[in-house]
Image (spheres, rainbow, N blue to C red):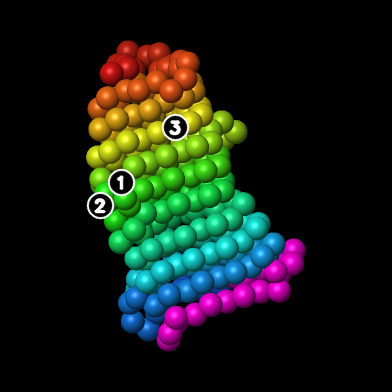
Amino acid sequence: LLGNVGVTTGGGVGDNFTISGTTNGDIAGKNVTVTAGLGNVTFTGAVGAAQKLGTLTVTSGATTTFGSTVAADEIGLTSTTVQLTGDVTSSTSGLVIPGNLVLLGNVGITTGGIAGHDFSVSGTTEGAGQNLTVTAGLGNVTFTGAVGAAQKLGTLTVLSGETTRFDSTIQADEIGLTSTTVQLTGDVTASTSGLAITGNLILLGNVGVTTGGGVGDNFT
């Protein structure tokens, strides 16, 4: 990117936008906005790895897929489904995913870290055996839809100095939740380990917690 760029496709089904290589600015801080209507958006290579982007905004009524890492000051991803493969860093803001999240690899998500730099997923979160780590600093973390219901996660780790909220069920092999307050609404299953909640626990619904059941698979 030699300047701030907006890309707009025809907007119909199949009017997709794809980049097979990497995406960078000639210098750091360049903005890119992709508007694809009902088309898919795919970034195969790393985004902002060599020169971190300023703002990355994607609007797609279908699927947005990142095949590698993503780094920008601000990231907005509005799609029916967002697929992530590598780490995502939104260094001066939060990260909001209004649709579903699918993990294609082990993913670490890092927000700007100050109050208001929140991470949220409005849809479901899936990824068979994949690990998800969310580091939000003083931001809140919210999963509105079920986590791991169709495809159980490997390890789910959340680090937030504020509130981590789950509005549905959680299923993963291992779960670690470090927040000032953790809010649970549905059943939580850590199928091969214990469950440690470092902070206060608030129940927003009737909750069943199930650990792996082996020696040392404790709930604390």
Q: Is residue 43 magenta?
A: no
Q: In x, y percent, where is residue 12?
A: 74, 67
Residue at numbered disc 3? 166
Q: Is residue 12 magenta?
A: yes
Q: Which of marks 2 and 3 precedes in the sequence?
A: 2
Q: Which of marks 2 and 1 precedes in the sequence?
A: 2
Q: Amino acid at mark 2?
A: Ile
Which contiguous range is marked in magenta?
1-18
Callout 3: few (<14), some (14-19), or many (20+) C-alpha neighbours within 10 Å? many
Q: In x, y percent, where is residue 108?
A: 37, 49
| Rendered residue at 28%/38% (across/down) | 162
Element marked by disc 1:
loop
Separation of disc 3 and disc 2 at Cα? 21 Å
| Rendered residue at 47%/74% (across/down) | 32
Relative vertical location of residue 46 with respect to residue 27 in this rendering, above or below: above
Q: Which of 194/187 is in front?
A: 187
Callout 1: few (<14), some (14-19), or many (20+) C-alpha neighbours within 10 Å? many
Q: Are marks 1 and 2 in contact (CB under 8 Å)?
A: yes
Separation of disc 1 and disc 3 at Cα? 15 Å
Element marked by disc 2:
loop
